Amino acid sequence: MNKGAKTNNFKATLIKTKLSARTVLLYVTYIALAVLSGGVFDGNIAFGLFVGATYSANPIIVTFVYLASSVVYGWDSLLQAGVRASVIVLFVVIHYFAKRKIGKLNLLLYLILANVFYCVFRFTDYFNTFDRLLYSAMGIAFAYVSIYVFRAVFVRGLSYRPALDETVCIGLFVIVASFCVAQISFYGLQLIYFIAPFAILFAVVCFGDTTALTGAVLIGLGDIFANGNFECCVFCVLSAISAVTLCKVNRYLGAVSVLIVDVLMSFFLDLHGEFSTLVFAPTFSSVFVFVVVPSQVFRYVRDYCSGSAERYLGKSVAKKIGDNVSRRLYRLSDIFLSMKNAFFTMSASGVTAEDAEKAIVKQCSEAVCTDCAQRTKCWRQELRQTEQSLLQLGVCAVKRGKCTILDVPQTLSVKCERVSAMLSEMNTQAQNYRSYKERIDAADNGKTLLGEQMGGVSSLLMQLATDCKNSAGYDRTKEQELVERLVFHNVLCSGAVIAKQKDVVTVVVTVGKNDIDNATIEKVASSVLKQNMVVERVENTESDAWLNVLLTVKPRYSVTFGVSSVAKDGNEISGDTHTVLQTDNGKCIVALCDGMGSGEMAEQMSATSISLVESFYRAGFDNDVILSCVNKLLVGSGNEIFCAVDIAVLDLYNGLADFIKLGACIGLVKNEGKVEIVSGSSLPLGILEEMKPSVTKKALMSGDVVVLVSDGVADCFKDPTALAATFAEVSLNVPQSIAEVILAKAMKLCSNKPADDMTVVVAKIV
C-alpha cells in the first residue's frame, strides 16, 4: 500500500442504506464470514471484517451482526466485541459530525485503542499477553485488508480491474476466508468442499482462466495453513485446470470434470480419508448449484465485471451520435448560409441619385411650370437648355439636401419668373428623397447585419459539425493505468475515459463523492498523460455517491492584469471601458474601448460596444465577424457616437497574440526590458459601414507585458516614443502597479487636469 496516501473516511451515514444487488451481496458475505471467523485467532479476524464492513456499509447493521456472531463463541467473546465495536463506532460518529476524514495514523490509533481491553482482559501470564498482542496485530492488519477489499468489490465494483494493492489485499482476503472455512466440518464433511468447486467454476466462467487458477491456489493455501495437508490444494488446482480446459467447450462439461477430479483423487489419493458415496456429497452439491444457476446470471456478472464491452459500446454509440449530430449541424450550417445570401440579395438597391435627380426635375416642372406663360418657350424652343439648368440645380439639391439661389444657373435665373417657387419645390423633393434614402439604407443595413450574423452562425455550426465528425481516439491502456494509480492514492475511482480529438486531450474520471481530491487527481493524471492536466469542472452523476471530474490540458500561459483610470476633468463618469476574459478554447481577450467624447452617453456606447465584443468572443465568432457586426450596430444607432477599440487576443497554449486596432492609439509590449510599439491606422467603430481593422501578430512569452491606453493618456505625451520611454523606465512587475505609474505620469504631464478620459490596461504573460 502507498505509505504516503491517506486512508479515506468511513462512510458513516447513520441512515437507512439503499439496498442493491451489490449491497445485499456485501451483507451476505460479511455475515457468513463473521460467523465462520468468530473463533479464529480469538475473534481478531472477525474484528478486521467488522472494520472493513463499517467502511462500506451501514455501521448500525454491521455492528449488530458483529455482536450477534460473537455470541456463538461465549460471553467473553461478546464482551470483547462490544468494547471493540463501541470504540470504533464512537470515533466514526465523532468524525462524521466533525466532517473530518479518518487519516491513516488516526485509524491505526483507534484500532490500537479498540484492542487495549482485549489485551489486558483477564490477565494470566506474559505468554498469554504476547499471544493476544500478536493476534491483535493480525486483526489490525486484516482490518486494512478488509477495507481495501470491501471498497474494491462492493463499493467501486469490478467493472475495472483492481489496482495492484487491491489485488494483493483480495488475495490475502481469499486465503484468510479459506483458512476460516477449512476449519469447519459437518458430520465429517469439510465445508471447504461445499464452497471451493462452485467458486472455481464461477471464476472460470465469469473472470477468466488466470483468475480461476490463481483463486484455486489461494483457496488451497488457506486449507494448507488450517489443516497442514496439501490434498485440498491439489484438488483445487486440478479442478481449476480441468474446468478451464473443458468450460471452453461447455460449462456443464467443465462442471462434470470437477466431479471426476474429486472421484479420481478420492480413489487414488484418499482425498477425503475414505472412498464412499457420502464423501462426494459436498463436491456434488457445489457442482449441482453451479449447474442449476441460469446462464444469464453468469453472463450478467461477466459483462458487469469485464466492463470493457460496455465501455467500448458506449464509445461506439457516442461516435455514432456524434456523426448524426454532425450531419444535422452541417444541414443547419447550410440553412444559415442560405439565409445570409438571401438577406444580402434582398437588400433593396432603391432609387439611385441619378434617377432621383431626373425625377425631381420632372416633378418640379409639373408642379411649377404647368400654368406658366413662358412654358412653351422654355420646354419647346429651349428644351435642352432648360433641362440642363434644372438638372444642375437638382444635382445640388440631392447632393447637399437643399439648394439656394446661389446654385441657380444664370441661364435659368435670367428667364424664369418663378425661381423662388422652383427652389422651394426642389428642396421639398430633395428632402423627400433623403428621407426615402435613409429608410432604404436602414433596412439594407439591418438585412446586411442579419446576413453577416447568419454567416457567422453558419461558420460556427460548420466548425461544430467538423468537431463532432472527427472521431475521438481512446487510450485503453492509459485509462486502466489512471484508474489503478488513483486507487493506489486512495481516490476511489470506478472508471476513466481519455479522449483525444484534434490534438485536444480530455479526461473524465468517475470518483467517489467522499474521496474527491482535485490536487491528487491532477497530479496523477498529469503523470499518466505526461502533460500538465487541470480540473476544469466537477459534475454530478445519476448516483449521489459518484462524481465525474473533467480534466483538460492546462494552458502553457496565464494572464494577470491591472487597470487604472480617471474621468475627464469635471466629469464623474468615464467613457472608457475594458474587459479581460478567458474563453473556453484557451484564449484570453484583453480589450479597451474608448467612447468618443465623455460623460454618460460616451460611457453607455463604450459599455455597449465592449459588451458586444465580449459576448461575440465568448460565442466563438471570428474577429472579422465580431467587429463588422458591432460596427454596423453603431452605424445604425444614429447617435453619431464613435468608439475606438483596442483588442489583444492571446492564445494561452502557444503565446501567439493578435493586436486588433480600430481607431485606437498605440499599444506597447515589453520583452526583457525592451519596449516595442504596436500601432494601427484604422478608423473607429461607427464611422463607416465598411471598415477593415488593423491587425498585428506577435509571439509573446512568459514575462512579457502588454499595455493598452486610451487616447486621453497618449495625448499627454508629445509622441509615442515618449510614452514607450516612460513604460521602459518602470521597473515594477505587478500589472496594477505598472498601470498606476503610467497613469500618474500622464496626469502629471497634463497638470492633473485631464482633457479626456484616461485609462491604462496592463496584462502580464505568466
Image (tube, helix red, strand yellow):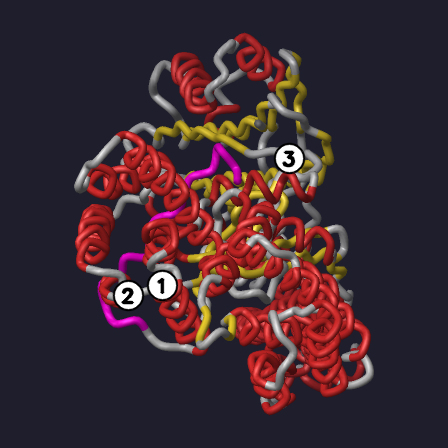
Q: Are marks 2 and 1 in contact (CB under 8 Å)?
A: yes
Amino acid tagged 2: Ser
Disc assigned to residue 69 = 2
Residue 358 visible in the current orientation? no
Disc number lying in front (3 or 1): 1
- Pick whichever of labels 2 and 3 is earlier in the sequence: 2
Residue 72 visible in the current orientation? yes
Instruction: Look at the image and give the residue range highlighted in magenta.
Output: 1-17
Looking at the picture, tell me which residue is in the foreground, 266 or 713: 266
- Pick whichever of labels 3 and 1 is earlier in the sequence: 1
Q: CA distance from mark 2 to mark 1?
A: 6 Å
Answer few, some or many: residues within 10 Å of disc 2's Cα (few below 14, many 20 plus, some between 14 and 19).
many
Asked whether 11 falls inside the magenta stretch, the response is yes
State the image coordinates of residue 689 (x, y, percent, origin top left): 64, 57
- Viewed as shown, does residue 505 lie left or right of 726? right
Q: Split into 4 quadrants, where in the image is the C terminus?
A: top right
